[in-house]
Image (cartoon, rainbow, N blue to C red):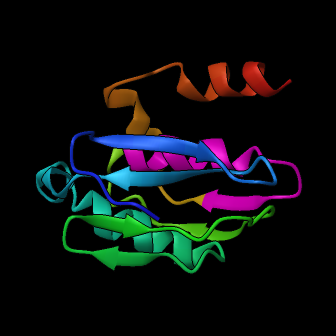
Amino acid sequence: MMARNDRESATLATPRDTLLPKLISGELRVKESDRILAIVENLNRIGVAAEERPDGLIVPEGKKRFDGDVITRGDHRIAMAFGVLSKLPGSEITIDDSDCVEVSYPGFWNDLDRAVA
């Protein structure tokens, strides 16, 4: 997997159409939380063997189903990212602080539910 630092984040469709974060900038270590660490820890919690790197992370491709508990650290973007993954068929993800999204997107959960309905 190629690493790049020119984008804050990106998403890819794996061969099985599973969406996962792929590229992340080291700048994300100084946001509301250390987002690189939070993403890696939470991916591992839901069954993805992600690896942390100083300026990003590596995510293996091909996981189709996700199960586990996500700890947001009060970070709205972590909650929203894993909220999207929770909607994939067969996935069972619990988000510890779903209300933290209110700071940036109060209607997020309703919009997400409508988008996948």
**How many numbered marks, from 0 up?**
0
Magenta segment: does it hold 96?
no
Residue situated in front as seen by the camera: 50 or 39: 50
Magenta segment: does it hold 82?
yes
Residue 112 image offset from top left, x and y in percent = 66, 27
User: Can you say whether 100 is above or below 14 in the image?
Assistant: above
* Residue displayed at 52% across by 42% down: 11
Q: Quadrant of residue 84?
A: top right
Left or right side of 41 for 66: right
Q: Quadrant of residue 13?
A: top right
Residue situated in front as seen by the camera: 21 or 117: 21
Residue 5 image offset from top left, x and y in percent = 21, 50
User: Can you say whether 102 is above or below 111 in the image?
Assistant: below
Residue situated in front as seen by the camera: 83 or 27: 27
User: Can you say whether 113 is above or below 107 in the image?
Assistant: below
Residue 102 image offset from top left, x and y in percent = 40, 29
Quadrant showing the C terminus: top right
Left or right side of 51 for 19: right
Magenta part of the chain: 77-94
Residue 75 image offset from top left, x and y in percent = 32, 49
User: Can you say whether 44 is above or below 13 in the image?
Assistant: below
* Residue displayed at 42% across by 71% down: 40
Q: Residue furthest front?
A: 2
* Residue displayed at 80% across by 61% down: 64
